[in-house]
Amino acid sequence: MDIAGNLSELLGNIPPSVKLVAVSKTKPNEDILEAYDTGFRVFGENKAQELSRKYSELPKDIEWHFIGHMQSNKVKYIAPFVSLIHGIDSFKLLKEINKQAIRNDRVINCLFQFHIATESTKFGFDLEEVSGILDLKEFGELKNIRICGVMGMATYTSDTAIVRNEFRNLKDIFTNLKSSFFAEQESFKEISMGMSGDYEIAIEEGSTMIRVGSAIFGERD
């Protein structure tokens, strides 16, 4: 597997304004280091303990993103170092991240995850739920989290019209939240959508951040 070549080709195909997160879940350290040795630094994992282990074993200038479903009792493993948690899907989780951020004297960046797909197995909020959270006095008291934008996963389908419509919906959600709640916050700017099979459509529909694994590292182990 030519990881360096795949990475170079991918970076050459996306606009410089779009951030690539190389999804390294289940991949060994050697594969991550092959990408790292090209100068790339942004990697994503979906299991807290695996991420914690890789953080301890790999170079410390890596920017680690947590991209999977986050369980509240696992936040403590990644709170000392994680750069961005993509999948905030409950207020309980947000409160736990804030608690662990305080313990580590940090402000942790987070994205609200929205359920935009037809599959019921995917996690995420709807716009009404997030608006309700943002209106809470208790939310305003969470000083050690920073909401940086939104994240979503499209339906796994070959019908590109469905995928495009779902990505467009997430962009509309972002725009609504930006104007209603985050107009003054420059840090609220990320739309994390698009993976190996659909990142090109996602970028066309306004993605600022794509999460790509198999197109770089090959199929997961």
Image (cartoon, rainbow, N blue to C red):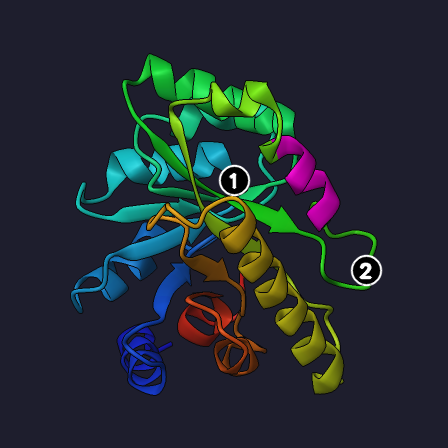
Q: Nearer the viewer, mark 1 or mark 2?
A: 2
Q: Is residue 155 left or right of residue 208?
A: right
Q: Position of residue 113 (x, y in %)?
A: 60, 48
Q: Nearer the viewer, residue 97 or 126?
A: 126
Residue at the image point whose x is 73% and y is 68% from the top:
155
Secondary structure beneath dot 1 equals loop
Query: Which residue is label 2 attached to?
Result: 119
Magenta part of the chain: 127-133
- Classify residue 153 as left or right of residue 1: right
129 in the magenta segment:
yes
Q: Quadrant of residue 112?
A: top right
Image quadrant in which the N terminus is located = bottom left
Give whichever of 121, 38 is nearer the camera. 121
Assess disc 1: are there few (<14), some (14-19) or many (≥20) residues with their C-alpha within 10 Å of its C-alpha: some
Question: Identity of the amino acid at label 1?
Answer: Lys
* Residue 66, percent from left and from top: 46, 44
Residue at the spot 83% in from the left edge and 53% down from the top edge = 120
Q: In this view, which residue lies farthest toward the top?
A: 103
Q: Is residue 215 left or right of residue 30?
A: right
Residue ID at (69%, 70%): 166
> What percent of the width, then of the height, locates residue 172?
61, 65
For label 1, the residue is 47
Query: Is residue 73 in view?
Result: no
In the figure, 71 relative to 61: above or below? above
Give the quadrant of the C terminus: bottom right
> Which numbered marker is on residue 26?
none
Q: Is residue 159 left or right of residue 99?
A: right
